Amino acid sequence: MQQEEEEMLVPHSDFAADGPQAMEVAPAESVSTVENQPIEDPPTSRFSWTIENFSRLNIKKHYSDVFHVGGYKWRVLIFPKGNNVDHLSMYLDVADSANLPYGWSRYAQFSLAVVNQMFGRLSVRKDTQHQFNARESDWGFTSFMPLSELYDPGRGFLVNDTLIVEAEVAVRRVVDYWTYDSKKETGYVGLKNQGATCYMNSLLQTLYHTPYFRKAVYHMPTTENDMPSGSIPLALQSLFYKLQYSDSSVATKELTKSFGWDTYDSFMQHDVQELNRVLCEKLEDKMKGTVVEGTIQQLFEGHHMNYIECINVDYKSTRKESFYDLQLDVKGCRDVYASFDKYVEVERLEGDNKYHAEQHGLQDARKGVLFIDFPPVLQLQLKRFEYDFMRDSMVKINDRYEFPLQLDLDRENGKYLSPDADRSVRNLYTLHSVLVHSGGVHGGHYYAYIRPTLSDQWFKFDDERVTKEDIKRALEEQYGGEEELPQTNPGFNNTPFKFTKYSNAYMLVYIRESDKEKIICNVDEKDIAEHLRIRLKKEQEEKEHKKKEKAEAHLYTIIKVARNEDLAEQIGKDIYFDLVDHDKVRSFRIQKQTPFNVFKEEVAKEFGVPVQCQRFWLWAKRQNHTYRPNRPLTHQEETQSVGQLREVSNKVNSAELKLFLEIEIGPDLCPIPPPDKTKEDILLFFKLYDPMKEELRCVGRLFVKSTGKPVEILTKLNEMAGFAPDEEIELYEEIKYEPNVMCEHIDKRLTFRASQLEDGDIICYQKSPATEDGEQCRYPEVPLFLEYVHNRQIVHFRSLERPKEDDFCLELSKLSSYDEVVERVAKQLGSDEPSKIRLTPHNCYSQQPKPQPIKYRGVDHLSDMLVHYNQTSDILYYEVLDIPLPELQGLKTLKVAFHHATKDEVVIHSIRLPKQSSVGDVINDLKTKVELSHPDAELRLLEVFYHKIYKIFPHSEKIENINDQYWTLRAEEIPEEEKNLGPQDRLIHVYHFTKDSSQNQMQVQNFGEPFFLIIREGETLAEVKARIQKKLQVPDEEYSKWKFAFLSLGRPDYLQDSDIVSNRFQRRDVYGAWEQYLGLEHSDTAPKRSYSASQNRHTFEKPVKIYN
């Protein structure tokens, strides 16, 4: 699938993610939606920015000049070396955002492009739209294009170290997207954008609006015990029911789960055709043995016949095949009919390509395809995305391609039909839906134009938004091709410019006229199974109930009541600090006007505690951010309504009232009325710590007198703990835990007031450490234990080679030093050399390792290793080095491909030398590792990139600045003949090339291994050819097909055998994009071998061995 990064849009914040970007990843629903009401043409302008000396920009961010569109100021922001990614990052920025009035907002559709200055058709352009505001004042693409492509001089983006960036901005009036009601406006509802499910929503709408298909789905047997997320039929039934009866957009999560595509990756790795097939095959399978068996075939299956027919003998071979959809060529075809013509085109098998016919041997033959029958619903996949072998990447074909409202496949006397076809069937089709992709190959947005009843009214289904559209939008505007933009800003760019339309059809659905009535049938409640109706109505009612609750929330107060039982259950398990997690206690939803005394009756029923035995305390947030019971409610307060009380307790606009219910238990274990509380009485809570078990638990609460002393309650505390009455214990006050823990020892001889203890305070106590039989505990005292709990961190360690799977987990402290962390990892791995452990942090956004590992002692604490912008991760990647990390940091590792002088092989060596070393040192090191043709052989190091030689490194060059990430470093022996160049001899570059006409213009593509060759004064091409053939050892038969050309500025000038080659090469050492070379034109027959993927390298023709 084409990577749909635009569906995960965010602004530029300094982090890496795939796609247009913001400080937080915006919910996908709110982004990939465009107001598409027919409105007046928006003000549009194009801005061009020429950046000179681009590769020398030593700044992280670079802003363009300000330009104006729609009365607003804009500028382009780029990160020349990537925004923490190995891609160029580029954004559109509101230039005056800092000075705009509060609450400003503006909406723009825009595209950003890097212009290809050699081959304009290969410019990289991405488009998106965004509502700009103070929080998101820039928007765009963190991974706009790989730096490796941008900086490759042969690609044409950077010419004379100059980059040209273009922005095209259309400012639209801001439409309140959220107030639009699709159901009310159109009668239909949309599907929620789940983020990266891209093409799925448009396909599902198309299938849903094929009523015969929907009816069959409803009739598939499912039971009330099935779970939608585990059953495709039920998930689809549920989705279709909601599309039919819901008033608002519908979610697709259950469906994607049911067929196992519940991750972003699933959609990245498949395309719409695969999704269509997966769904149809699975449904076909589930329909077997049911009343609807065969529906998928009846609707979508057609048949064609592949034939091969001999010309000179009576022999014909045929094979019948079925299809559910047809893939039609867009490239080179002006419309659907041209694609069908191409589909049935006859191919001649002759010459080298004869057909081997049984009994007749090799024969000239005709080969082709004809259709036996077409299905009632014809799905046409338009090949808008193609793999370009020359560029080793996917390209999108935006050429103009027309499709008719009515498609006649019987035309020209049934030219598409086989002799066996039933000619009584009229293959006249009418267009039902147009599925559209807007954007480039690396991203975009998908939506569909459908006319559900085949009337003249079209509808656009764009995720959750459905709008009425006219036929022009659905058809002509989706043909693709180029469009001329009217001049709106003559001062800017005086030439009216044509821009490629990036939004165009990629799938068409036609319905056969004669089957129209059958397929566009009526589907109503009686088609839906009883259990399904009950289940979905129940779901709908729950949804309505929640909606109602939400709408009525202002009439109610939520009261959360914490009791002793909650404290005992939570402390030491869910929480260690404070007393309770209020989200886990019993909550009551009470109407605001209810008197509090009436609420107490409900509590009596719920907890079995008589009203007179209940005393409620209000909680308060203290200045040190702890949350404690503060004071009991007064009698006067208890006569108020619940709503008034909430306002007393909570100045913040929260609909919640949090209370602590104090219950006193009498000797018979039944509740008794609470004792009167005077100003002298303090309510204290007690936690008990066991250093041996490292356990903390709540043991209860007591009232103490402020003038009393802790020594007076020691016996009681020992009883609560289950200790002997005279056990020596130590008391500590838990004061706070954010940002750090404060827990202080209490002097047992001072009064509670003197120790500044008040209502709601917490005392932690334990046996005196001195009495602990001298056994070793990790945390002998409460403060140490609380410090440990506050800072402990479970870290998931993964091997850098297997970054997707956890290897082991360690419990560490956020305060652990660098040394402590690597020591624990080394110990876990059974290594006694922690200095050989290298760690790499985790990128929370891309869910991958960051590109840069952590330097030796480069951070102080574990917490610094885990932080990523405003997020904290719990993942680290490790690798075990063969030398200590401090040593490695002083070294530079280069991967060098050594080309053997006589053997047909390439051996890749990792050369590791101190950073200050020179190329000469690399060559000397290499000599000890490789097999030379003779002991005195001299080596040279070359920079090879995209099959061209860019540089011979001088021996004195320092290796620190050599980049082997994108360039191949090649080492080879210097041939003897090159060492003694005569005054007239010239060393020229020789490259292999083929010509590619895919982009409507001839383009030279290099491949294979480039090399140097000496040409001598007066030497003819015939003589040079003989030497090249000997060097490359190409067989005569193949070599006779090769052509030879002098190339300058990328244009071939073909040479004759009698031409004097040296006359062409007058300039010496021409490097860069416009170099001159001798080109060998022939087909690239080398098997495509993948190199290490991360290196973005190119195929070698020779077998490759890797030595690390």
Image (cartoon, rainbow, N blue to C red):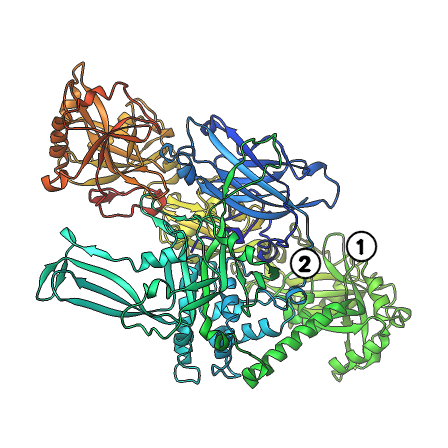
The quadrant of the image that shows the N terminus is bottom left
Say which mark, if any, is on residue 903.
Answer: none
Direction from residue 1021 to residue 795 in the image, left or right: right
Direction from residue 1103 to residue 595 in the image, left or right: right
| Residue 534 x, y percent position in the rendering | 60, 83
Mark 2 is surrounded, within 10 Å at the Cα level, by few (under 14), some (14 to 19) or many (20 or more) other residues, namely few
Q: 355 and 52: which one is in front?
A: 355
Q: Look at label 2 and name its amino acid.
A: Trp
Q: 115 and 950: which one is in front?
A: 115
The quadrant of the image that shows the C terminus is top left
Q: 719 and 808: which one is in front?
A: 808
Which residue corresponds to mark 1? 754
| Residue 1052 x, y percent position in the rendering | 27, 31
Q: Quadrant of residue 787?
A: bottom right
| Residue 572 x, y percent position in the rendering | 61, 66
Residue mark closest to the camera, 1 vs 2? 2
- The first of marks 1 and 2 along the sequence is 2
Q: Answer yes or no: is residue 632 visible.
A: no
Task: Assign a secondary structure to mark 1.
Answer: loop
Direction from residue 867 to residue 543 in the image, left or right: right
Q: Look at label 1 and name its amino acid.
A: Ala
Q: Quadrant of residue 1014?
A: top left
Which residue corresponds to mark 2? 178
Direction from residue 317 to residue 618 in the image, left or right: right
Task: Assign a secondary structure to mark 2.
Answer: helix
| Residue at the (66%, 62%) spot, across then down | 765
Q: Answer yes or no: is residue 163 visible.
A: yes
